[in-house]
Image (spheres, grey):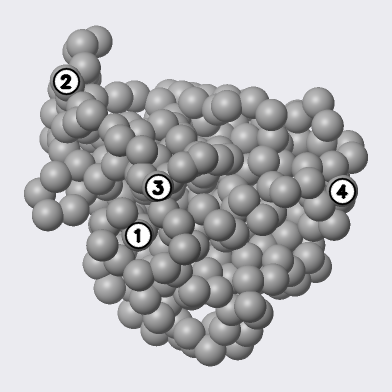
């Protein structure tokens, strides 16, 4: 399976993300995807960078606003997303009224992979995962893309699924998918999780270490994992994705409790949350005007040395 991965910039100030290169739009029912050639999506910035009102909206090849959460198909051949806002733009993560930055935990600086999310997936907070016995974290499935290229915020790429890790975040299942950009120069060498161990020795161990400690500088405890921190293989990962996609379909068709998730979309035509292109444009225009080029100052970043 090749999936589409939405990404956020991996630098300071941003959490997980949204997608970036996909196909020509057409009417779609929940769960179905376009069958034509890939085409780049475009993004539109609004608000001031490094401020709480900053948003990145997505447009398809026709220039129409779309939701990266709901309108970008999961399958190719078949910062964080603002899940509570119309059309789900990428926005800065905010905690206690301040922008949230990823801590630099020695020897790592920021994220150690391109961090994004699979569109059209949802970890249902009302359903217990059969593998972890914990409910979902109310987000799309997170993706750690391990390719050699540092990607830009808002890029949508195709990825090869390699494996998955079950992080338990404050009692909630927060799957971390391991994948690689299909256009990476070494992508042909990677087919399953053991290939990561073979061709990128130490990377999975570093990933487990990073995910264990990344919230400690905020005063939170170390994260825990199901399966004693074991990375599961591609076949296991595909089953997790399948389940999360079914949860997303149920949400888009109003068959479950979606809570505060905003399901507004422009391409899932049989969804009760479907809106017209004109309505989508009005939603975006109600947000701040396009952002100026200058950026505001950001807090100085520091190194955190965490040792046993």
Of the residues under marks 3 and 4, which one precedes in the sequence?
Answer: 4
Tell me the mark number nearer the camera, choosing from 3 and 4: 3
Residue in view at x 40 percent, y 47 percent:
305
Check contact, mark 1 vs mark 4: CB within 8 A: no
Pointer 2 residue: 296
Q: Nearer the viewer, residue 89 or 107?
A: 107
Which numbered mark, 2 or 3, is in the foreground of this view? 3
Q: Which mark is residue 198?
A: 4
Q: Where in the figure is residue 2, as x and y percent of width and height?
A: 74, 48
Per the model, the C-alpha gap separating discs 3 and 1 is 11 Å
Q: Nearer the viewer, mark 2 or mark 1?
A: 1
Label 1 Cα crowd, 10 Å radius (few <14 / some 14-19 / many 20+): some
**What residue would you read off at disc 3?**
305
Identify the residue at horizontal 64%, vertical 26% (top origin).
Answer: 149
- Relative to the observer, which residue lies in front, 97 or 304? 304
Give the mark, 2 or 1, whose residue is nearer the N terminus: 1
């Amino acid at each position: 399976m090749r999936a589409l991965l939405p990404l956020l910039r991996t630098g300071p100030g941003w959490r997980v993300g949204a997608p970036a290169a996909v196909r020509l739009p057409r009417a779609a029912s929940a769960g179905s995807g376009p069958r034509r050639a890939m085409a780049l999506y475009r993004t539109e910035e609004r608000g001031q960078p490094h401020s709480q009102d900053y948003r990145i909206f997505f447009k398809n090849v026709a220039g129409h606003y779309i939701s990266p959460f709901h309108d970008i198909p999961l399958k190719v051949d078949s910062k964080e997303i603002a899940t509570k806002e119309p059309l789900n733009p990428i926005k800065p993560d905010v905690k206690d009224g301040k922008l949230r930055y990823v801590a630099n935990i020695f020897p790592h600086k920021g994220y150690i992979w391109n961090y994004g999310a699979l569109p059209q997936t949802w970890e249902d907070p009302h359903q217990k995962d059969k593998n972890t016995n914990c409910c979902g974290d109310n987000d799309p499935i997170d993706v750690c893309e391990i390719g050699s290229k540092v990607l830009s915020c808002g890029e949508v790429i195709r990825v090869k699924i390699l494996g998955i890790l079950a992080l338990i975040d404050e009692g909630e299942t927060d799957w971390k998918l391991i994948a690689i950009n299909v256009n990476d120069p070494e992508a042909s060498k990677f087919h399953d999780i053991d290939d990561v161990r073979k061709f990128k020795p130490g990377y999975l161990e570093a990933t487990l270490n990073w995910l264990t400690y990344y919230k400690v500088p905020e005063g939170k405890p170390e994260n825990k994992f199901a399966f004693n921190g074991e990375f599961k293989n591609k076949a296991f990962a595909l089953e997790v994705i399948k389940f999360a996609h079914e949860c997303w379909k149920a949400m888009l068709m109003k068959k479950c409790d979606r809570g505060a998730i905003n399901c507004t979309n422009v391409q899932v035509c049989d969804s009760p949350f479907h809106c017209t292109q004109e309505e989508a444009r009005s939603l975006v225009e109600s947000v701040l005007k396009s952002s100026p080029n200058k950026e505001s100052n950001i807090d100085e970043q520091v190194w955190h040395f965490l040792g046993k």
